[in-house]
Image (cartoon, rainbow, N blue to C red):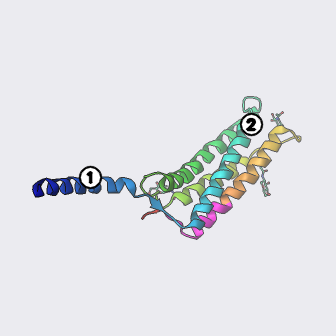
Amino acid sequence: MARVIFLLVAVVSVFQALAAPLHSRAVTSPQCSQFNVYASAAIDEARLSLGSINTGNDIGNARNILQAQLSLLDANTGVTEIADSLLTSAPPAPANASATVVAGLQAALASLNQIFFLADNTTKAAVAAANASMITALDNAQQAVAANCQTTLN
Ligand SMILES: *[C@@H]1O[C@H](CO)[C@@H](O)[C@H](O)[C@H]1NC(C)=O
Ligand SMILES: *[C@@H]1O[C@H](CO)[C@@H](O)[C@H](O)[C@H]1NC(C)=O
Ligand SMILES: *[C@@H]1O[C@H](CO)[C@@H](O)[C@H](O)[C@H]1NC(C)=O
């Protein structure tokens, strides 16, 4: 009997040891988490604004609009790495994840500022909305970098 109990304890210990890494998740400060949530939401708004533009109808601006969308995807990679590490049993995000967000947004804004308009139209309104959202996202990502926000295993 003692032998059986010993074996059971040993087996349970092994399972606990195997399970432990799966249960640990990355943590960060509430402030850092909030920077990422705000940046992520604003990136999503910018994505929706740019998505409303039909680049096939706007050949003159198509390259800059598409380039801005690609840079926005780069920024989104950073916020997603951070969010995933906090919400799922994923490893911590790369140390420079917030810097990736900043770099993507700066590139996206640079592309937006190359877009030209002859008149007020729906494209112009969509670009202005995307611009405002990206500036909000950039502000939050820059604050995260300034605060040296990291995700670490708890
Ligand atoms: C983040 O680090 C990776 C790997 O070291 C590097 O390839 C990437 O350029 C860095 N990104 C930024 C924005 O610094
Ligand atoms: C984006 O907003 C900034 C600050 O309000 C402004 O200077 C810039 O012209 C805007 N760019 C576009 C493309 O709307
Ligand atoms: C808005 O005007 C720009 C030129 O200023 C043009 O390229 C674009 O296609 C127009 N957008 C719409 C929806 O008409």
Relative image position of residue 45 (x, y in whole percent): 70, 47
Instruction: Indicate the secondary structure of the residue bearing disc 2.
Output: loop
The structure residue drawn at horizontal position 62% and vertical position 52%, both measured from the top left corner, is 40
Q: Is mark 1 within 8 Å of ligand 1?
A: no
Q: Place residue 142 in its image quadrant.
A: bottom right
Report if residue 113 is visible in the image. Answer: no
**Is-magenta flag for residue 9?**
no
Mark 1: amino acid = Phe
- Point out the tag, 1 or 2, that comes first from the N-terminus: 1
Q: Which residue is mark 1?
A: 15
For label 2, count other residues whose C-alpha is less than 10 Å away and answer few (under 14), some (14-19) or many (20+): few
The magenta stretch is: 139-151
Discs 1, 2 touching: Cβ within 8 Å: no
Q: Is residue 148 magenta?
A: yes
Residue type (three-letter) at the residue carrying disc 2: Ser
Tell me the SS state at disc 1: helix
Q: Residue at x 71, y 57 (%)?
A: 135
Q: Quadrant of the C terminus?
A: bottom left
